[in-house]
Amino acid sequence: MGLKIKLGAAMHTDFSIGFDKRRHSHLSDLTLYVHRFQPTQLWGVLWGLARMAHAPDGPWMDRFFARSQQLLRDFTPEGLAHMGWALASLGYVPEKLWLRAFCGMCAYKMRWVNDVMQSQTMDLACLLG
C-alpha cells in the first residue's frame, strides 16, 4: 500500500496510507525523541497517527503519556481537544491519574474563554461531554 492520489475534474485528493514494517520502524525511531516534544508536536503526531488509524505501540505511548503530563499546562484548548480526539479514535484509555490531570486542565482552560477561543472551548466541551 502506498500514497494514492486521485485527480479528477474537481481535483479531489484521497490519501490512503498504509503502514508496513519499514514505515513502522520510522515511528519506532520517534520513540527516542518523544521526551523532547513540545505540546504542538505531541498532539500533532498523535492526531496525525489517529487520522491514519495507526495505533503506536506501548513503549511509544508510555513516553507520550509521561511527556504530555509534564506539559499539560502548556497545551492550548485546541491541542487538548485534538489530543483527546486522537486518544479516543485510537481506542486508548489512559491511566486514571493522567486522565484526571487531563480533564482538570481542560476544565481550567475553559475558564479563560474569550471570543477568539470560542470554537476551541466548544471542542473541549464536546470532548468532556
Image (cartoon, helix red, strand yellow):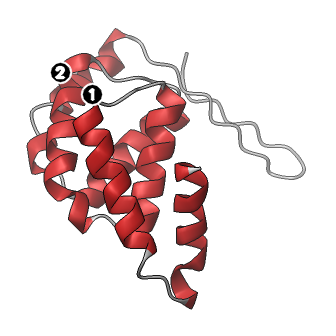
Mark 1 or 2: in front is: 2
Judge left or right: residue 85 versus residue 55.
Answer: right
Q: To which quarter of the image does residue 54 belong?
A: top left
State the image coordinates of residue 110 (x, y, percent, origin top left).
45, 72
State the image coordinates of residue 16 (x, y, percent, origin top left).
62, 28
State the image coordinates of residue 65 (x, y, percent, origin top left).
22, 38
| Outermost residue toward the bottom in this view | 115
Give the distance between the C-alpha atoms of the residues marked 1 and 2, in whole angstroms: 11 Å
State the image coordinates of residue 82 (x, y, percent, origin top left).
47, 52
| Outermost residue toward the right in this view | 9
- Name the residue located 27 percent from the left edge and 29 percent from the top edge: 95
* Image height of 13 relative to 31, above or below: below
Judge left or right: residue 20 versus residue 60.
Answer: right
Is the residue marked by circle 2 packed among few (<14), some (14-19), or many (20+) residues within 10 Å? few
Along the viewing direction, whichever of 39 and 30 lies nearer the viewer: 39
Determine the secondary structure under disc 1.
Answer: helix
Q: To which quarter of the image does residue 125 belong?
A: bottom right
Q: Amino acid at mark 2?
A: Pro
Judge left or right: residue 27 versus residue 85.
Answer: left
* Image height of 77 relative to 41, above or below: below
Question: Disc 1 vs disc 2: Cβ atoms closer than 8 Å?
Answer: no
Along the viewing direction, whichever of 99 and 7 lies nearer the viewer: 99
Is the residue marked by circle 1 packed among few (<14), some (14-19), or many (20+) residues within 10 Å? some
Along the viewing direction, whichever of 105 and 118 lies nearer the viewer: 105
Q: Amino acid at mark 1?
A: Leu
- Name the residue located 64 percent from the left edge and 30 percent from the top edge: 4
Q: Which residue is mark 2?
A: 59
* Image height of 61 relative to 11, above or below: above
* Image height of 112 relative to 108, above or below: below
Q: Which residue is mark 1?
A: 27
